[in-house]
Image (cartoon, rainbow, N blue to C red):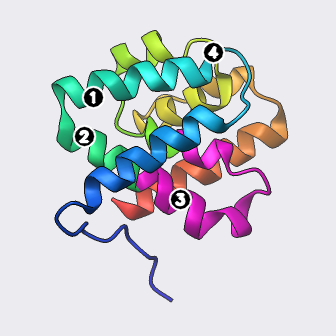
């Protein structure tokens, strides 16, 4: 069965995806300052790179919708991995320093496995699986 890819949004649908991502991020209980850091990252993308904001929002929603039941019970690792999948190294350092799982996945997407050292064996395995799912969608 072919892997589903995020559909190209209809006019006006992209902004709905962004608003949904903002609502989800605002509601979820997460450790550290991930909620605030994600909100700051999204605000920066809205100002500087709206196309990347749209792609990040679509990917986060797609991963949660299509992969949650297959991979994890908690959708948060998928959501935040999708949200930060296109983050630059500078953005990773700025927004994900205190968030080892999301940081490890985004570093893996840059070809850097150094973030895995901060994770347990099972969390590291999950990070690798999520990274693989994101790569398959490219």
Q: Residues within 10 Å of mark 2 (few under 14, many from 20)?
A: some
Q: Nearer the viewer, residue 36 or 118?
A: 36
| Mark toward the start of the polypeptide (4 vs 3) | 4
Give the residue number, with chain letter if any, for mark 2: 52
Contact between marks 4 and 1 (CB within 8 A): the answer is no
In magenta, the rendered stretch is 59-80
Q: Residues within 10 Å of mark 1 (few under 14, many from 20)?
A: some
The secondary element bearing badge 2 is classed as helix
What label sits on residue 45 in the rendered view?
1
Give the residue number, with chain letter if any, for mark 3: 63
User: Where residue 135 sits: x, y (%)?
Assistant: 42, 55
* Residue 41 found in image quarter: top left
User: Where residue 115 sits: x, y (%)?
Assistant: 61, 23
The secondary element bearing badge 1 is classed as helix
Q: In screen coordinates, is 81 left or right of 67?
A: left
Give the residue number, with chain letter if any, for mark 4: 33
User: Where residue 60 sits: x, y (%)?
Assistant: 48, 50
């Amino acid at each position: 069965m072919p892997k589903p890819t995020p559909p190209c949004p209809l006019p006006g649908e992209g902004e709905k995806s962004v608003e949904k991502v903002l609502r989800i991020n605002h509601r979820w209980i997460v450790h550290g300052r991930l909620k605030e850091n994600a909100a700051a990252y999204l605000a920066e993308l809205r100002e500087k790179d709206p196309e990347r904001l749209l792609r990040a929002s679509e990917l986060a929603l797609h991963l949660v919708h299509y992969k949650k039941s297959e991979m994890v019970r908690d959708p948060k690792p998928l959501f935040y991995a999708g949200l930060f999948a296109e983050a630059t190294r500078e953005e990773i350092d700025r927004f994900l320093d205190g968030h080892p799982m999301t940081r490890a996945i985004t570093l893996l997407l840059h070809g850097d496995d150094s973030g895995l050292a901060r994770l347990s064996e099972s969390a590291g395995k999950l990070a690798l699986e999520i990274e693989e799912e994101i790569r398959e969608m490219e």
